[in-house]
Amino acid sequence: MVMLYGVPRSRAIRCLWLLEELGVPYENRKTNFATGDTRTPEFLRLNPNGHIPVLVDDDVTLFESLAINLYLARKHGGGLWPVTVADEGRTYQWSVWAMTELEEPFLTSLMHRVIYPEGQRDAAKADDAAARAQAPIGVLEGALAGRDYLLGGTFTVADLNVAAVLLWARLANIALPPAVRAWHGRCTARPALKRANAA
């Protein structure tokens, strides 16, 4: 049995979403960073960084949400893993890009607009992060021009990984341009995401 440590209202939603897409039986071990669950000796043996999610699949233990997703999609396929080596490369490209270019400005804006208590929020930092988010959003808008999904006409793990990072857009109050908005709407309308949120 696959075990995923985490809760939906965290980066673990990315992996829960993929597990639901794949139809792989799994157990969601509710592990919440906000309650100290990720600082126990037992959890730190799984991920010494003290973060969720963590996947345990028989003798394989992985952390980092998008790496977990690449592993699961590669192992189980289900139409989500790319067919060609070139598209495998693009899948890695977009997944790494989502973490290095897209996540930080969205997360910073979210923290200073929603997550932090009022007294700890810095509107200037939130606005700066929202402004910095426009460059990667523009890259994504260009990549989606004339296509339904990042690798062409089919939803894959590349789309899921990037779309999952963008789940913070609305809460962070960052507007998405037309092609990105339409693509994100197609991705987030998938029933598997609804099931993942209820996990």
Image: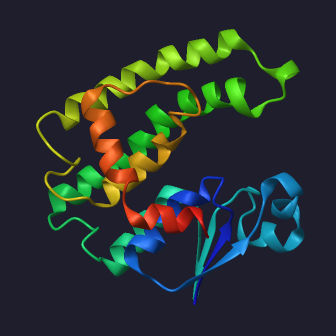
The percent coordinates of residue 164 (x first, y second) are: 46, 50
Q: Say which quarter of the image contains residue 135.
A: top left
Image quarter of the N terminus: bottom right
Q: Say which quarter of the image contains residue 107.
A: top right
Residue lying furthest top:
124
In this picture, is 77 found above or below 14? Answer: below
Identify the residue shown where x is 22% and y is 49%: 149
Residue in front for this viewpoint, 179 or 51: 179
In this picture, is 130 found above or below 110? Answer: above
Count of number-bearing discs: 0
Identify the residue shown where x is 52% and y is 36%: 103
Residue in front for this viewpoint, 65 or 156: 156
Residue in front for this viewpoint, 151 or 47: 151
Left or right of 70: which side holds 103? right
Identify the residue shown where x is 41% and y is 81%: 23
The percent coordinates of residue 116 (x first, y second) are: 79, 30
In this picture, is 99 found above or below 77? Answer: above
Residue lying furthest left:
146
Residue in front for this viewpoint, 28 or 102: 28
Residue 64 is at least partly visible in this image? no
The percent coordinates of residue 4 (x first, y second) are: 62, 73
Residue 13 is at least partly visible in this image? yes
Identify the residue shown where x is 31% and y is 23%: 138
Left or right of 44: which side holds 198? left
Image quarter of the C terminus: bottom right
